[in-house]
């Protein structure tokens, strides 16, 4: 049986705002929203999901990745959709694991570069950064109301997301490591 609302624990203030970005994969017609975290913290442990949205969590319940499988052409355009102007830093932990939730509503602006994944009907009491370009709206009862993503970019063959990850974590491949050890002539 699916959970009715996604419960979270919010601890404020957080130490810093992680980096995050929206990458619309043109070939798969899916949206990927990765969130920066330390290598030991970004390991997938569990999930919360619906038919079209997957929230991927680490062992501590921190969100590390969001995937939206509804093609952008099917996102509902809302002309007056306005990204939240302000948000606070917070450490947000999801309390449910390996559960399903009712299908959220996917809303976007006319450019389809700003998106709202609406999970509940209740009003949002707080806006918190999940990462740069990603904001969670939380109810007064600590339930997830929405996740907002801004400045979504088109990505071809995963090149954009790969370059973004390399800019965050560096190139840690064995070949790059070996090349760094080889003396330059």
Image (spheres, grey):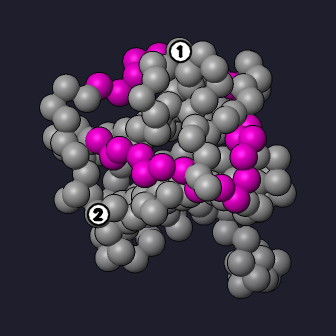
Quadrant of the snapshot with the C terminus: bottom right
Image quadrant assignment for residue 98: bottom right
Instruction: Determine the residue located farthest toward the front in the rendered image.
Output: 1
Quadrant of the snapshot with the N terminus: bottom right
Image quadrant assignment for residue 7: top right
- Neighbor class of circle 1 (other Cα within 10 Å; few <14, some 14-19, many 20+) is few
Q: Earlier in the sequence, mark 2 or mark 1?
A: 2
In this rendering, the label closer to the viewer, 2 or 1:
1
**48 relative to 76 in the view: left or right:** right
Q: Return the residue at label 2.
A: 71
**170 relative to 32 in the view: left or right:** right
- Asked whether residue 179 appears in the rendered view, the answer is no
Query: Residue 171, image x and y in percent?
Result: 67, 69
Question: Residue 166, which numbered label?
Answer: none
Is residue 4 positioned above or below 83 on the image?
below
Q: Secondary structure at mark 1?
A: loop
Is 183 within the magenta? no
Query: Residue 122, image x and y in percent?
Result: 46, 23
Is residue 154 positioned above or below 121 on the image?
below
Q: Which residues are magenta?
A: 82-107
Depth check: 55 or 110 in front? Answer: 55
Image quadrant assignment for residue 170: bottom right
Is residue 78 positioned above or below 74 on the image?
above
Residue lying at 60% horizontally and 62% vertically, measured from the top left = 166
Q: Return the residue at label 1.
A: 125
């Amino acid at each position: 049986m699916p959970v009715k609302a996604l419960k979270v624990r919010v601890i404020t203030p957080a130490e810093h705002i992680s980096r995050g970005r929206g990458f619309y994969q043109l070939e798969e017609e899916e949206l990927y929203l990765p969130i920066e975290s330390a290598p030991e913290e970004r390991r997938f442990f569990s999930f919360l999901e619906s038919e079209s949205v997957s929230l991927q969590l680490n062992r501590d319940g921190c969100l590390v990745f969001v995937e939206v499988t509804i093609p952008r052409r099917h996102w509902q355009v809302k002309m007056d959709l306005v990204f939240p102007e302000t948000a606070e830093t917070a450490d947000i932990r999801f309390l449910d694991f390996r559960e399903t939730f009712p299908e959220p509503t996917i809303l976007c602006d006319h450019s389809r570069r700003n998106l709202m994944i609406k999970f509940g009907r209740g009003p949002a009491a707080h806006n918190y950064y999940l990462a740069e370009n990603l904001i969670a709206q939380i109810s007064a009862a600590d339930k997830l109301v929405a996740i907002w993503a801004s400045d979504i970019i088109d990505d071809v063959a995963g090149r954009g997301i790969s370059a973004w990850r390399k800019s965050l974590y560096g190139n840690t491949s064995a070949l790059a490591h070996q090349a760094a050890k080889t003396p330059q002539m």
